[in-house]
Amino acid sequence: MANIKQIGMAAGTFSVALGIGFVMQNGDALASRFGAETGQQEVAPFTNVDTASQETEAGVTAIAADGTPIETAQAGVVALQTPSIESPSDAARAAVILPETAKVPARQDPPVQLANLDPDDSVEVDSDTILESEMSCAPQMTATASVAATVAVSVIAPCYTETAFTVHHQGMMFTAVTDIDGIADLSVPALAEVAVVIAAFDEGEGSVATVVIPDFASYDRAVLQWQGDTSVMLSAYEGGADFGDSGHIYVDNPGDVSRVSNAEGGYLQRLGDSTIEDALIAEVYTFPTGMMNGESDVMLVAEAEITGANCGQELSAQSIQISPTGQPSALDLRMVMPECDAVGDFLILQNMFEDLTIAMR
């Protein structure tokens, strides 16, 4: 990705839906978000079309290896009408609506044991032993506030060794895996002052933890998430930086938390285990808005590389953006990638995020 060029491309059609992430998604909603095969409308390819009412303009720039602009295409974006988003009360933020995959089944009474016809062959069952065994297998989770408004999460699931599970937080989702002892230690960027984190295993097992983040109001955060190997990424261009500059923060130049503590700029985290097939992946950019003393501007864009695996295929992704006030915004993206003769080029999806402009204090 060191070299880029731009290519001309016809306007495409995007299906973009506004939404919020306070309610954890269940399995059906997750399948819908990332393009389940059933019950979906056909997605239009890159052709000029007339969009429905309430259209907004979304910029799409195709790029490739030499960095010279050739053409910028504007794509019609259909914005679905949604209610306004307000900061929830503390009680509302603390409330948790578990997804079906994260609900722990209600404890059932021990099964009734039928007496054996032969008294000598009867088996005594200790109900307390059964209950204790079941409880010891239930996943446990702890969460504590950590540096740069992150949550230090520890999942302990001794009956789920080397097992994939899904982490849910304010609409953000990613796949994690326990180690050989059934333990997973994670650092999760907080997307709410009262951070509710869920670890959901298959068959309904899971655990929930809640923690208050004292420095939440000091940061802006942007999230780009997707499922599987779609070759998309989140880029933050700080202070007018160009692609490949030190101020271009992305997966190959993520920076670290020291940039935040020194008020130099932001940093990026990639969450999710890509070794798992069809894993949920999230990239999170953090900018220390409350610590900057001078003027700063950051251009946030989603970028997609055209590869042999995704050319001509449908791409699904979602952006989530959180301001220091806690106001969330989200966009769902579905589009058809260009054909395979464009392999090696890039698309710039500029209107998935609001740029950051920090005035001098």
Image (cartoon, rainbow, N blue to C red):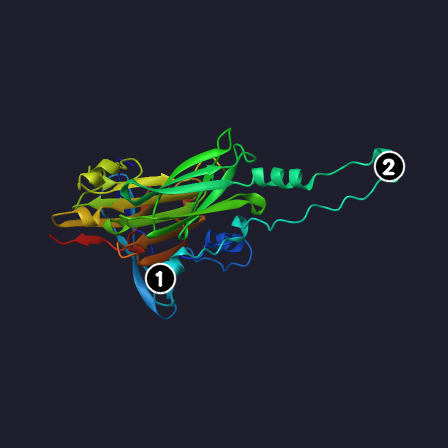
Closer to the camera in the image, 221 or 141: 141
Tag 1 near tag 2, CB within 8 Å: no
- 10 Å crowding of disc 2: few (<14), some (14-19), many (20+): few
Query: Image quadrant of residue 343?
Result: top left
Which label sits on residue 119? 2
> Residue extending furthest right?
118
Residue 102 point in image, percent of width and height: 52, 49
- Inspect this view and state whether residue 208 appears: yes
Which label sits on residue 30? none
Closer to the camera in the image, 155 or 31: 155
Residue 229 point in image, percent of width and height: 43, 41
Task: Provide the secondary structure element on which disc 2 rests.
Answer: helix
Picture layout, residue 252 above or below residue 49: above
**Residue type at numbered disc 2:** Pro
Quadrant (top left, top right, bottom left, bottom right) of the N terminus: top left
x 53%, y 43%: residue: 201
- 10 Å crowding of disc 1: few (<14), some (14-19), many (20+): few
x 51%, y 38%: residue: 164
- Apparent side of residue 66 relative to residue 205 in the rendered image (left or right): left
Which label sits on residue 89? 1
- Apparent side of residue 73 relative to residue 158 in the rendered image (left or right): left
Q: How far apart are marks 1 and 2 (CA)?
A: 62 Å
Picture layout, residue 193 above or below residue 252: below
